[in-house]
Image (tube, grey):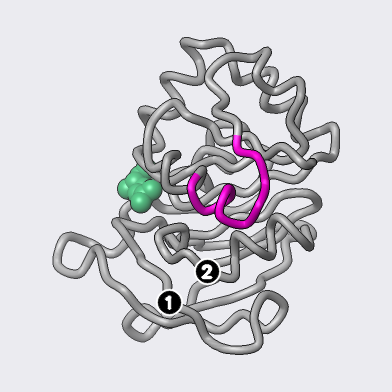
């Protein structure tokens, strides 16, 4: 049985664990470097990227996480997890701006389309999301969204990394968790 590690330093790791277990996979919390040894895939949840970064330094996880990613095993970062992958671990070649929507409309629910992931639009939550300003090298855009009058990528793929600027793990049948577990 595939074991899915969930980085459990801060943020909504419990929601990701529930979503993974509902699909019949085993979820394992990752708090220390040795927790990375026996997992097949890793999810880095949303939360506060500065805090996740500080705790990852404190628990000596930065090097082991980079090694895990280089080993080719699949990793999915959501929201703060995406920021952490790009800015802290420097494994995702995108330019990202934190809290990019300003204070007026910084959290909302909407539907997005991502044909590689689902044949119909699905519900997502943007919670003080980052904005992807630029994608570099071979980053593939799986979905984008129009914020005001500017379109930005909201789901991208780079080698063995999947990254999304929104939350979807609260919906039991959200297609992204399924896509990450079964097809990524
Ligand atoms: N605003 C958070 C950050 O900058 C991200 C928010 C989230 O993960 N939902 O890290």
Q: Residue at label 2?
A: 174
Q: Compared with residue 171, is residue 44 higher up or lower down, i.e. above or below?
A: above
Q: Compared with residue 109, is residue 20 higher up or lower down, i.e. above or below?
A: above
- Residue 24 lies in the magenta-colored region: yes
The quadrant where residue 5 appears: top right
Task: Give how far apart the Cα atoms at labels 2 and 1 are.
Answer: 8 Å
User: Total marks drawn?
Assistant: 2
Task: Judge from the rendering whether residue 96 lies leftward or rightward of residue 99; answer left or right.
Answer: right
Q: Nearer the viewer, residue 94 or 143?
A: 143
Residue lying at 36% horizontally and 67% vertically, measured from the top left: 125
How far from the left and from the top, in percent, is residue 148? Answer: 32, 82
Residue lying at 71% horizontally and 27% vertically, measured from the top left: 66
Q: Nearer the viewer, residue 23 or 43?
A: 23
State yes or no: discs 2 and 1 in contact (Cβ < 8 Å): yes
Give the residues drawn in magenta, as a range: 18-27
* Residue 134 badge: none
Q: For marks 2 and 1, give the one nearer the viewer.
A: 2
Q: Residue at label 1?
A: 123
How far from the left and from the top, in percent, is residue 46? Answer: 42, 46
């Amino acid at each position: 049985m595939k074991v899915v590690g969930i980085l459990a330093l801060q943020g909504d790791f419990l929601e990701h664990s529930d979503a993974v277990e509902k699909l019949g996979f085993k979820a394992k919390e990752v708090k220390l470097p040795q927790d990375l040894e026996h997992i097949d895939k890793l999810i880095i949840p949303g939360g506060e990227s500065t805090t996740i970064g500080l705790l990852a330094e404190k628990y000596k996880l930065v090097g082991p996480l980079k090694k895990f990613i280089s080993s080719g095993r699949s990793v999915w970062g959501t929201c703060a997890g995406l920021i952490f992958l790009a800015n802290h671990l420097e494994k995702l070649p995108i330019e990202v701006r934190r809290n990019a929507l300003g204070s007026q409309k910084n959290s909302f629910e909407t539907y997005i389309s991502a044909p590689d992931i689902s044949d119909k639009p699905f519900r997502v939550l943007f919670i003080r999301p980052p904005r992807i300003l630029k994608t570099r090298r071979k980053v593939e855009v799986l979905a984008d969204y129009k914020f005001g009058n500017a379109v930005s990528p909201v789901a991208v793929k780079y080698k063995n990394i999947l990254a999304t600027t929104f939350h979807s793990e609260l919906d039991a049948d959200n297609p992204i968790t399924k896509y990450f577990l079964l097809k990524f």
